[in-house]
Image: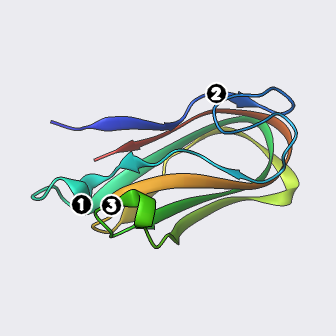
Amino acid sequence: MATTKTILDTTTYGTPSGNYDGSSMDWVSDAVQASGYYRGYSGLQTVTFSFSDFLGVMYVEATLDEIQSDANWFTAYTIGDQSTSMSGIYAPSIVGNFTWVRVRVDFFDAGTINSVTITY
């Protein structure tokens, strides 16, 4: 049975939501538990991004640390660039026994992030 968790809910440029204050170009989502948090799960995870005219760069950051507040974060996947807006759904698979994941958004300059989820 697959588990799906929401990393980031709908976030529209210029409108405060979650950790986004509505004006910052760079910010980080809250962390969610990844497959490695639950011993015995596979290291294969699918991160699903849904965008509408998103202009920016998004990084899936992960850690192997058990306690996320002390975590050493590293980039596990990058999507987007600073010059081309993105629309649609993208669902890359990433492999790793990550305990926590989050997204870091840089250069957020337009559009809507409809959602970012992880399934394992």
Residue at numbered disc 2: 10
In which quadrant will I find the N terminus?
top left
Numbered tag placed on residue 67 in the rendering: 3
Please provide percent x and percent y for residue 61.
Answer: 52, 62
Residue nearest the observer in this picture, 19 or 77: 19
- Amino acid at dot 3: Ile
Please provide percent x and percent y for residue 66.
Answer: 28, 63
In three-dimensional space, the C-alpha distance between marks 1 and 3, rounded to whole angstroms, equals: 12 Å
Residue at numbered disc 1: 36
In three-dimensional space, the C-alpha distance between marks 1 and 2, rounded to whole angstroms, equals: 26 Å
| For residue 52, side relative to residue 4 (left or right) | right
| For residue 63, side relative to residue 56 (left or right) | left
Residue 112: quadrant of the picture: top right
Q: Is residue 69 above or below residue 13?
A: below
At 71% from the left edge and 51% from the top edge, which residue is drawn? 27
Tell me which numbered mark, 3 or 2, is placed earlier along the sequence.
Answer: 2
